Image (cartoon, helix red, strand yellow):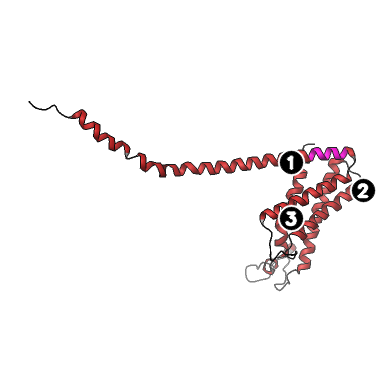
Amino acid sequence: MRPTPYLLSALLACALLQAQTVDAQQAQPPSLSTPLPVPGGGAGLGPGGIPEPADRPAPTKEETLQKAKAQSDQIADMQARRIAQQLNLNQNQLARVRAILIGREDELRKAFSPDAPGAKDHPLTAQERQLKIQQVHDATMKRIEAVLNPQQKQQFDAMLERMRTDRAHRAGMAAARQRHVIGAGSPASAPTTHAPDSAPAAPTSAPDTAPAASAPPPSR
């Protein structure tokens, strides 16, 4: 089924999104969680337009972490159900795949947490973060494979291969676009460099030949 590779690509994209947002969720400043003031200086409006007290306390760090985990667990559950539908998993397989995907979210959340060992002294670079995401993704795919029967594993391997092909194709297109952008900028500088050298050439040679052709014959 063609939509399945895109589902697996979504797993990697979700892992990337989780890694990019986990720091922001855990380090959310109190000012972002307070109600917005309404015209006239009143309190902010909550769900259903009900005014909220202006001094509503900001969520604690623990509450923010719990909310982030609940959201990621919900995403993992949705992904597990889609995989189960595509590969015709039984209930036991579905439960195991769900646990694997939830474990993936937990691993990424801990890896990119500001409280991770060494995170403050040696923060991860963008390349290191991308490498970690890829490592977690690959390990997740292997764990899912271990849950499948031979027929499902064959389907899953074929889907992974298509996903790798699609990923390589997208990377190639991105590199080609980058080369095109760099190449498009080169001609813009060419006139500035070469025009001053070639422009004076025409006027310089013209005075040498034109007078010789139009000079009057000597008088006798």
- Residue 73 placement (x, y as % from top left): 81, 56
**Spatial CA span between label 3 and label 1:** 21 Å
**In the rendered structure, which disc, 3 or 1, sits on the residue that comes first in sequence?**
3
Q: Is residue 170 left or right of residue 203?
A: right
Quadrant into which the C terminus falls:
top left
Q: Which residue is mark 2?
A: 92
Marks 2 and 1, how far apart at CA: 28 Å
Asked if labels 1 and 3 touch by Cβ distance under 8 angstroms, the answer is: no
Q: Secondary structure at mark 1?
A: helix
- Above or below: residue 14 compared with residue 167: below
- Determine the residue positioned at 77% across, 39% down: 161
**In the depicted view, which residue is nearer to us: 37 or 66?**
66
* Amino acid tagged 1: Arg
Residue wearing tag 1:
164
- Give, as a three-letter code, the residue at label 3: Gln
Amino acid carrying label 2: it is Asn
